[in-house]
Each structure stands twice: as C-alpha cells, then as structure tokens.
Image: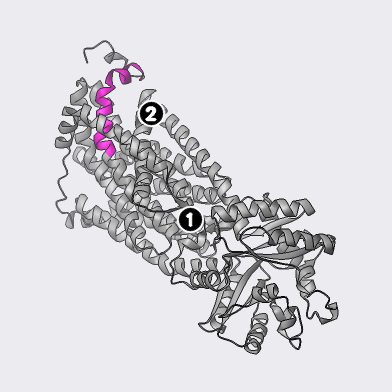
Amino acid sequence: MLNFGRFIARHRIGVIILSLVLLIPAALGFINTRVNYDILYYLPDEIETMQGQDILLKDFGKGAYAIFIVNGMTDSEAAQLKKEVENTEHVASVVWYDSILDDSIPQEFLPEELYNTFHSDHGTLMAVFFDEGTSSDNTMKAIDELRAKVGNNCFLSSMSAVVTDTKNLVDSELFWYVLIAVLLSALVLVLTMDSFMAPVLFLLTIGIAVIYNLGTNIFKGEISFITMSLAAVLQLAVTMDYSIFLWNSYMEKKKGYGDNTEAMAHAISDTIVSVSASSLTTVAGFIALCFMTFTLGLDLGVVMAKGVILGVLLCITVLPAFILCCDKLIKRFSHKPLNIKGKGIGKLVVKHNKLFLVVLMLLWIPALIGYKHLDVYYDLANSLPDYLPSSQANAVLAEDFDTASIEMILAPDDLSPRDTQLMLKEIQDVDGIQFALGSASLLPSGMPEDFMVGDLTADLSANGHQLILIGTEYPVASDEVNAQIEKVNRIIKKYSPEAMLIGEAPCTKDLISITDRDFKVVSEVSIIAIFFLILISLKSITLPIILVLVIELGIYINLGISYFTGTTLPFIASIVIGTIQLGATVDYAILMTTRYQKERLGGMDRKKAVSEAVAKSVPSVLTSALGFFAATIGVGLYSDVDLIGSLCLLMGRGAIISMVLVFLLLPSMLVTFDRLIIQTSWGMKPLRHKNN
C-alpha cells in the first residue's frame, strides 16, 4: 500500500491530467444515457400485467393511452379537435362517440349509458392511444405537443401524462438539487475544516467521481429518474467521509515527515486500509437493494454501489494529487475551525449510562408502533404537486365523470359476442365500475353495423385479441380498486383463462404485492451482510449485534416519526431508507467501537475506555453526520417531487438520529455489556482475567 501511495504522490501531475482526460468519455456517456421516468416500467416482465402491456404494443400498435377531456366545446368543435389530435405524430387512434356512429346520426340513438360515458355537464372525453410505450420519448413528446395544441379547458389524464410531468419537473429541478447539496455541504466543511481550500478540493474530487459514475451508466443503457436525481446528492453524502479521513491523516503525517510527498504516501496507505473497510458496509447496503424483485432497486443499488467504489478510488488517487499541488493555497487560506470537543459527552454518558440505556431502549416502543402503522402511498400521481397539468386532469376526470382511472381487458377475439356481452354485464355490476366498453357493446341494439364508421373495430381488435375499456370511480392503489380488480379478474378468467386486465391500477396492485415482499428481503439481506462485515472487521460476535441494534433503532425512529407527524410516505422511501441509513451510518458506530477496543486493549478500564472513545469520535462523527444531513436536507425541502423530497428528508433526518444514538446509546451499551464483549471478541482475550 505504501508503494502505491508513493506512486500517486510522485506522479500527482499525471494523475490529475488523466482524471481530467477521462472526464471526456464520462461526460459523453452521461449525455447519452437515457433516463426512464416511469416507475411501473421496473415491474418484473413475467407478471401478467406487464405481459399484457407488451401484447397491447405488439398486436395493437398501442403502447400508451390517455383520457382527453374537452370542456366548453360544441360537438362539432370537439370533432374538429379530435381530427387535430389524430394528426399528431405518434398518436395511433382516438376513440369518441363519432368513432361509433356517423355524426349524421343523432346522439339520441346512442344508449344513455354509452352517451354518459363520453359526456358530462361540462364537456366530453375521448380515449387517445399512442403508438409507443408509456415512458417512451416519443409518447412524452406527443403529450407535450397535444397540450400545446389545445386550450386551458382541455386536459390529458393518464400515466403517460404523469410521466411527462415528472420528466419536465425533475429536469427543471435537477441542477438545483446538486447546487443546494454542494453549497450546504461546503458550509459544513468550511466550519469544521482548517482551510477554505479543503471544501473546494473535496467537492472537486467528488464531482469528478459523480461524473464518472453517471458516465459509466451508459453500459446500463438507461437509469431511473430517481437514481438520476439521487446519484450526485447521495454520492456526495456518503463519500465525503473518505476525503475527510485522508485530509486528517495527511495533516497528522506532515508532523512526522518533513517531506509532503512521503507524508501523503503514508496517508494514502492508511486511508486505503481504513476507508476500504468502512466503505464495504455502505456498498453492502446498496447491494442489498439489488435483491428487490422490483428492479428499481437493482437500478439504484448498482449505480450507488458503483458510486461509492469510484469515490474511494478517487479519494486515494485524485484527491491526494490535488492536495499536494495546492499546498501553498491550502496554507494561504487556512483558518481556525470550530473546536468540537466530545469529552463532556463522554463523561456524561458514562456517568449516567444505565439511565441513558433504559430511556433510549424504551424508545423501541413508540418507534415500533410508528413503524408498524406507517402510511405509504403507491399512486405515483400523488408524488407530484397539484399545479401540474396531469394532476389537474385527474381532478377534472374524477369530478366531472366520476372516473378515477381507466383499465383495459385483453380478451381473445374468438370469445363469442354473447359471452362478451355477459362478461361486460357482470363487470358493469361490480361496485365502482362506471363503464365497460368493447367493440361488441358499442353499437346500439338493433342498429345495423353499416352505421358504424371508421376503423373502430380494427382499433379494438387485432391479432387474436379484443380490447375492452373499463372506467372505475376508485382511485389507483386504493383498497377499493384493488378489491375491484380481484373481482373483475375472476369474472374475465371465468369466460376466458387467457384474458388479462391491464392498466395503471392493475400494475400498481402488482407493485404493492411485490414491494411488500421486497421490503422484507432488502431488510434481511442488508442486516445479515452488514452484520458479517462488522463481525469480520471487529472480530466479535456481540459487537455486530449491538451496532446493528443501535442503527436499526434509529431507522425505526426515523420512520416512526413520519407516522406520528401524519406524513404519508411514497412506498419506495419506506423500502430503501432502511438499507441506506444502516449502510451509511453504521460507520459512525464502527468508528467509536474501534476506538473503544483500542483504549480497552491499551489498559484502560471500561468506563475510561468508553469515555475516551466518545471524546475522540465525536468530532469525526459530528462532521460526517452534519455533512450527510447538509447534502440531503436542502434537496428534501426544495424538491416538488415527493418521491425525491421524502427520500432526502428521511436520509438527512436519519443521519442525525443515528449520530445521536451513537453518542448516547452505543456508549451506554458498551459500558453495560463490556464483560460480555470481552468474552466474545477475538483479540481481547488478555482482558478476560483482569479486574474490569
């Protein structure tokens, strides 16, 4: 390791030049990596709802659909607008009542139920089908073009509209996420470091690592907008510690070595050993996300694990080169940092260790209550603010047409008209169903098929399948719509086992089932992986239990606070926050415990060893936790995308909660269980027979 450190220190100019040259392919990779804004896209391919979406696109040429609400227009004006919509690029077809009957036929010939499907007191609605998928670039482009063509009294309600608004909003906020995180992190570093150049060099190095990380995503082809939004902020938050460690080690080595190059070589060597071990827990936390069946976890886990590894590599290569090259500037802009002392905390906790232990362990009761009763939402539209067009369209659809979402049935086209009619009648009788329309049910009874116009039959039948539209008054992800979906599925399977119910609501129901399982798997994998990493690192059986217990309490408190404050979280936040908080903040506990072991083996009694461990750990842990908090809390408060904002708020709050527990609960447990720790820890055997 020392030889590697010397190589980096001696070839610092070459290291910097190489790092800057590599920015070119990284930037090109970043620019050419597509961002996916549809969360439902990450459902597993083998489930029926996703297979149905593929059939819809392959056989019907319809990958996405939207409900187009037209208010304040006469039927003739609406008919003209319909033609304009049909002529929009990537619009496959538009279904309205004039798709069923020639407009020379009076509307009175339509059955009342059918007429009410398309009309309300305020206007009319049309079903718009697109020729590509929900989250394709062309579908989003078509949504934007349609909005530009129509006036303020027209609305587009669909998952594609939600995806388009998500893209537009995230794209407008992304720059500010990074800027806010950088500025607040820089503020923490300025206050806690002894040179104004330190934040500049740290952030520059991490910035290069972030670009490398985003650029290498080109090999994935695309990443989720959640991953894209969080990558820079989260990488900054979790890798800042490594830079601080190298800096402190270098400053310490300079006192013992007259030559800066040799001092940095030894600092790099020490950092490789310490940072490599601590970064493994963070990487393990992110890797645990890869075990999710919902592949958004794989997307986020791979990108962030890669980001941590790149952060470590640049911390021991590029950052040392920057520090050595900027030595004069570092001295010139040196200043006196905040004098953070932990002696008082250490003495206080050790003196009242039993009180702190009892009080803090009692927090498990409200934490578990809050955790068990935490409210989460799965309707992705709820993550967006009310002022967006898709949110307004959903509100108008619900208010004027008593319809919250549209679903579709894909049934074999050889299902007889009689069975189709019977099936639709049964579906229509299900509570909450507003309408059920297919080609076999659209023509008024007794009217010859000659009166049907256009290519409606072709639009709703293709390649052995027929398409049936279902409107429901129940919101997506509600208990009512999920129960309704089960009833409708039983009905359609009775008439044809091959029939499928697809759409946003059925996909979301699958999402709920899958992520419930994923939550348990991710939690178990992260706890087991980090437990064994700590066991190997600290060579103890009891210490991993104590450390994981402390951080897990912090996670439960963090999520429990959301329940007691009446905050409903997006489902993804409740899944990933546990593994991120455990992986990123257990390092605080490891740092203090390592110091405790060192002092204990040095001959100190248990209380003195714990007190010293707290005193010497407080400055580092406080700086690390505040840096994590600063990098995430500002984004959480700023973002209008609740999926992003909630995650960042939870991560920022979690860092502070973990820090407090490491300062108060962990020392109390070390003092209380000192004898057990010694008996179950390899390397502490000499202490077993001493008076402790």
Q: Looking at the picture, tell me which residue is in the foreground, 586 or 378.
A: 378
Does the CB distance between marks 2 and 1 fall below 8 Å?
A: no
Please provide percent x and percent y for residue 398.
54, 69
Q: Secondary structure at mark 1?
A: helix
Give the amino acid at mark 2.
Answer: Pro
How did the renderer colour the structure? one colour
Whether residue 15 can be seen here: no
Q: Nearer the viewer, residue 688 or 520?
A: 520
Amino acid residing under circle 1: Thr
Residue 494, numbered circle: none
- In this rendering, the answer to whether 424 lies above or below 529 is below
User: Left of 341 or right of it: where is 687?
Assistant: right
Q: Which residue is mark 2?
A: 544
Q: Tell me the number on the disc at residue 227.
A: 1
Residue at left offset 18%, top offset 57%? 333
User: Which residues fall within the magenta stretch?
Assistant: 661-681
Few, some or many residues within 10 Å of mark 1 (<14, 14–19, 20+): many
**Residue 226 image position (x, y, % from top left):** 48, 57
- In the image, residue 381 sits, relative to residue 237, either above or below, namely below
Please tell me whether mark 2 sits on a helix, a strand or a loop: helix
Quadrant location of the N terminus in the rendered image: top left
Q: Main secondary structure of the magenta part?
A: helix
**Which percent across, then down, holds residue 255?**
19, 40
Q: What is the total number of numbered labels drawn onto the structure image?
A: 2
Q: Residue at x 36, y 19 (%)?
A: 682
In primary-sequence order, the first of circles 2 and 1 is 1
Q: Residue at x 47, y 46 (%)?
A: 575
Q: Quadrant of residue 462?
A: bottom right
Cα separation between marks 2 and 1: 30 Å
